[in-house]
Image (cartoon, helix red, strand yellow):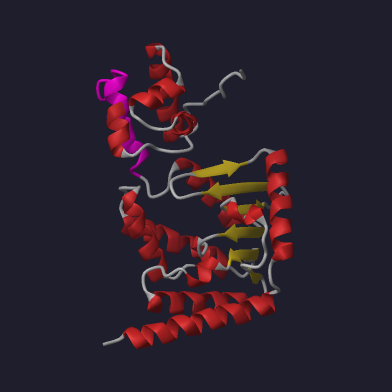
Amino acid sequence: MPAPKELDPSASLAALYGTKLRKLRTCAGWTQRELGDRIPIAHSRIAQFELGNETPPEDVNRKLDALLGADGDLVDLWVHVRRTPFPDWVQTFVTYEAKSKMMRKFSQIIPGLAQTEAYARAVLHAGQIYDDGDPEEKVRARLARQAVLERTDSPWVWIVLDEAVLYRVVGSRMVMRDQLARLLDLGERPRIHVQVLPFGATDPAAMGGSFTLLTLPDGREVGYEEGIIFGRLVEDADEVMRRAVLYDRLQANALSPAASAQLIRSAMEEHDSCASSEKP
């Protein structure tokens, strides 16, 4: 069995929480699986908590505190971890994003940098199911990130979207109509290219989730992958290369920017038509 990954508790509040949790679990003499069974929760989630890649929901954190006899220490630390609009690993990614020279994104949702305020609000308010942070604070933080696209030296941006993103209603039909119009406007900028991976592209790699690759000023590449309740920064060169190969494969199967724009426009018109018919 490989040795557990070393943690640096000074790296972030999430890392400090993970270090504390691992120490308490080890002192209790439990494996991650044994602790997970007592919650109950998958042991893989315990591993993510300990690595600082994910912060537990409040009810799970309270159970961890009680089971491990933390006397409120995990409860108190959890409050500080959750105080900021972005977890620590996301803050690092946002810092990289702001100074990147090129972005490559594959997404199963409209990427944050391309979201309208209404779309972002619908996504982040829905996210309260699994995240009890302030959604309005997160909306403001997400929109602020879009300033990178307004710079005179804005990065080159390549976006590949799963076709389902165009038709899945987020917020309302009107929200979707305006969101797709925003996507078309962005696609007309010389440094932004939007492509759609059509339903007919039967590549199972498209089912792996959303991820981003950033090229930094020094030529180094970093990645970020995300799901509903987690995010992970990828800095290991070999891991980043694997995702770059995956991105190239997805992009090769996507429609051209021109054909993608036609499909986006068609979906936008469909949402507009449905929104008109739904009006009283």
Answer yes or no: is residue 188 visible.
no
Residue sitting at 26 percent across and 87 percent down?
280
From what the image shows, is residue 278 above or below residue 135?
Answer: below
Residue 43 spot, x, y in % from top left = 45, 29
User: Does residue 175 appear left or right of residue 205 in this picture?
Assistant: left
User: Does residue 59 appear left or right of residue 42 in this picture?
Assistant: left
The answer to if 79 sits in the magenta stretch is yes
Residue 211 spot, x, y in % from top left = 59, 52
Residue sitting at 37 percent across and 56 percent down?
138
Residue 93 spot, x, y in % from top left = 54, 48
From what the image shows, is residue 18 above or below residue 120?
Answer: above
The magenta-colored residue range is 64-83
In which quadrant of the rendered view does residue 177 lie? bottom left
Question: How many numbered circles are shown?
Answer: 0
Residue 246 spot, x, y in % from top left = 70, 52
Q: Which quadrant of the rendered structure holds the N terminus?
A: top right
Residue sitting at 62 percent across and 65 percent down?
159
Q: Which of 147 and 56 is in front in this view?
A: 56
Q: Which of 218 and 86 is in front in this view?
A: 86
User: Does residue 184 appear left or right of residue 10 in this picture?
Assistant: right
Residue sitting at 61 percent across and 59 percent down?
106
The answer to if 183 sits in the magenta stretch is no
In which quadrant of the rendered view does residue 258 lie? bottom right
> Is most of the magenta stretch helix, strand or loop?
helix
Answer yes or no: is residue 110 visible.
yes
